[in-house]
Amino acid sequence: MAKGKAEQGPSGLEREIEETRERLAGTIDELLYRSHPRTIVSREVSQVKAFFVDPVTGEPRTENVLKVAAGVVGTIVVFALIRRVTR
């Protein structure tokens, strides 16, 4: 394989280096986009929305909404009981 590249000559190697440089630049741009805080927030908001609303139908996922509501109510009850017991 190295022998074939050596036969390309300097212009072939320069072209290959430039193609590699362009691929790396594209990869770096994509990584910068994915790691930007605004992109991360947008992605997380989409995941939370998808948990509560079916993205295909737009209908709420009542089972997930009820689970979260029950967890919140349960937490409030536990804190109220702890507060009552400690007084």
Image (cartoon, rainbow, N blue to C red):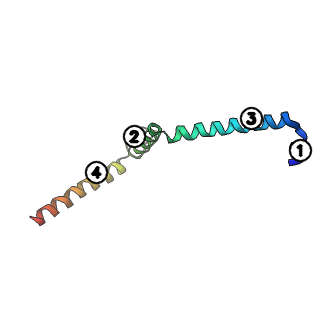
In x, y percent, where is residue 67?
32, 54
Disc number at residue 69? 4
Q: CA distance from mark 2 to mark 1?
A: 59 Å
Secondary structure beneath label 2: loop
Disc 3: which residue: 18
In x, y percent, where is residue 74?
24, 58
**Within 10 Å of the Cα at label 1, are there few (<14), some (14-19), or many (20+) other Cα atoms?**
few
Amino acid type for the residue under numbered disc 1? Gly
Amino acid type for the residue under numbered disc 3? Glu
Secondary structure beneath label 4: helix
> Which mark is in front, 4 or 2?
4
Q: CA distance from mark 3 to mark 2?
A: 50 Å
In x, y percent, where is residue 16?
78, 37
On the image, which quarter does residue 55 sit in? Answer: top left
The answer to which of marks 3 and 1 sits earlier in the sequence is 1
Amino acid type for the residue under numbered disc 2? Glu
Disc 2: which residue: 59
Residue 15 vertical position relative to residue 47 in the rendered view, above or below? above
Q: CA distance from mark 4 to mark 2?
A: 17 Å
Amino acid type for the residue under numbered disc 4? Ala
Disc number at residue 4? 1
